[in-house]
Amino acid sequence: MDILILTSFFLLILEVKNMAGEIFFDNTFHQLIRTNPDGKTEAFDDPILQVSRQRQHLLDWLKTKRTNNLPVETLVVSANSSTIIRAVNTDINRKVIRKDRILLKIEELKNKYNEAVLSNRAMKRLSNLLLDGHIPYIPKPLENYRIPIAALQTGVFCNKCQAFTMERKTKKWICRTCLDISLDAHISALYDYLYLVKPTITNSEFRNFLQLQSPSSAKKLLLSLKLNHSGHTKGRVYLLNSLIEG
């Protein structure tokens, strides 16, 4: 879910789409067709069905937490103010809105659901359950697009040169081109590894990805981040999810 709004009266799931050009909701084949400003046409899954599935998953999850009979509404929100929205079915405006109508839609729902179903205590409990059950989304582009790891540019990125030209010297990163200095450039590289490759890393993988020669320097850098880890010595595996959670 992109956004979940929790109130005493109802829950509201927002599926946000930020698409430029023109979008057409095809309710015959249940797809979203986008025409870019350059005239290129693309088809996507129907976001109305997508958010409807999210609603059902949430209802099923609420049952497991013994929190039943809560009204759950859904909306698809177009976040790009320049987007042209078209559809054959005029009733689509009940499920698809522009971002500037969110508050008005919430007011409509407040009028529809005018009896509180959750006390403040119950809302806090549900909020905590939702936060505890939240799992950060980590995409897998290499797996999804079948890109080999060897195709990735390795090294540490210099923000000034906009190139992978940083080298580790005397406890800091120094760009071999512009001599710019950074103390934590390795953190950005770890985020890249997390989102592009996988959520775990070993000392050897860390050195290969950052083009770092010294195992002891790699170990010190990894330990300095206080990442959760498993195993010992050469078999130690560092959990990069700690970067997000902490």
Image (spheres, rainbow, N blue to C red):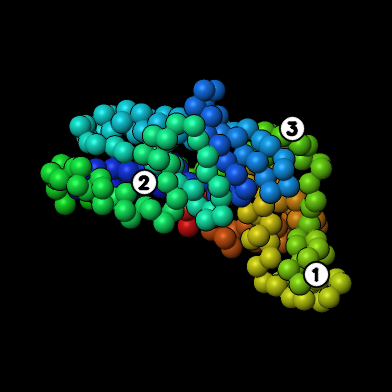
The relative height of residue 174 versus residue 65 in the rendered view (above or below) is: below
Badge 3 or badge 1: first in the primary sequence? 3
Q: Is residue 63 left or right of residue 185?
A: left
Badge 2 or badge 3: first in the primary sequence? 2
- Disc 2 vs disc 3: which is toward the camera? 2
Residue 101 visible at all: yes
Q: Residue at x 71, y 51 (%)?
A: 206
Could you say whether the residue bearing mark 2 is in a helix, strand or loop?
A: strand
Badge 2 or badge 1: first in the primary sequence? 2
Label 1 sits on residue: 161
Q: Quadrant of the N terminus?
A: top left
Task: Report, in whole angstroms, how far the alpha carbon at label 2 lies from the one at label 3.
Answer: 32 Å
Residue 132 visible at all: no
Q: Position of residue 218 (x, y in %)?
A: 70, 58
Label 2 sits on residue: 4
Amino acid type indicated by mark 1 = Cys
Q: Position of residue 80 (x, y in %)?
A: 54, 53
Q: Position of residue 223 (x, y in %)?
A: 59, 58
Label 3 sits on residue: 146
